[in-house]
């Protein structure tokens, strides 16, 4: 039995490229009922990108990449390995990241 995405998962796909939305819906349709399929994140805010980049990094490492040091969480497991914290596929569009002020 295929999985139908719930309203919460569908709303998290708002703003995501239509091709990727089709892939996600197709993957859910191919999943079986005993598998869990949930969309956790789609588009991220600049603040969420800073929060994620700060995990596993010191304030100096964050600031070197344009992320305010207040987001540093060196004792938390790193969740992103991007060299540019604002060059994520979770951003709305490259032009959205032009102004990096937080």
Image (cartoon, rainbow, N blue to C red):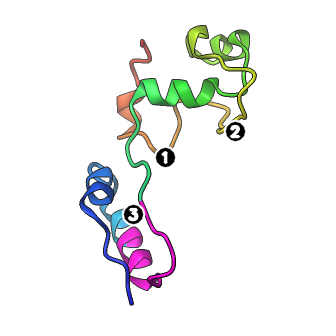
Circles 1, 2 touching at the beta carbon (< 8 Å): no
Magenta stretch bounds: 23-38
Q: Residue at x 32, y 69 (%)?
A: 5
Q: CA distance from mark 1 to mark 3?
A: 11 Å
The picture quadrant where one finds residue 25 is bottom left
Q: Which mark is residue 20?
A: 3
* Residue 31 point in image, percent of width and height: 47, 81
* Residue 43 point in image, percent of width and height: 37, 43
Q: Residue at x 49, y 46 (%)?
A: 89
Left or right relative to 7: residue 19: right
User: Up-down: is 5 above or below 85?
Assistant: below
Q: Which residue is mark 1?
A: 89
Q: Dot 1: what SS?
A: loop
For this rendering, which residue is in front, 98 or 67?
67
Q: CA distance from mark 3 to mark 2?
A: 22 Å
The picture quadrant where one finds residue 55 is top right
Q: Residue at x 72, y 34 (%)?
A: 77
* Residue 53 point in image, percent of width and height: 61, 28
Q: Is residue 102 located in the magenta-colored stretch of the structure?
A: no
Q: Dot 3: what SS?
A: helix
Q: Which residue is mark 2?
A: 81
Circle 1 Cα neighbour tier, 10 Å, few/some/many (<14 / 14–19 / ≥20): few
Q: Residue furthest front?
A: 34
């Amino acid at each position: 039995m295929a999985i139908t995405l719930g309203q919460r998962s569908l709303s998290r796909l708002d703003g995501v490229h239509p091709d990727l939305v089709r892939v996600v819906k197709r993957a859910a349709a191919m999943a079986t009922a005993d598998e869990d399929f949930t969309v956790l994140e789609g588009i991220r805010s600049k603040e969420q990108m800073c929060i994620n980049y700060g995990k596993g990094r010191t304030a100096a490492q964050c600031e070197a990449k344009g992320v305010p040091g207040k987001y540093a969480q060196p004792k938390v497991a790193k969740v992103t390995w991007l060299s540019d914290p604002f060059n994520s596929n979770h951003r709305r569009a490259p032009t959205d990241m032009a102004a990096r002020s937080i």
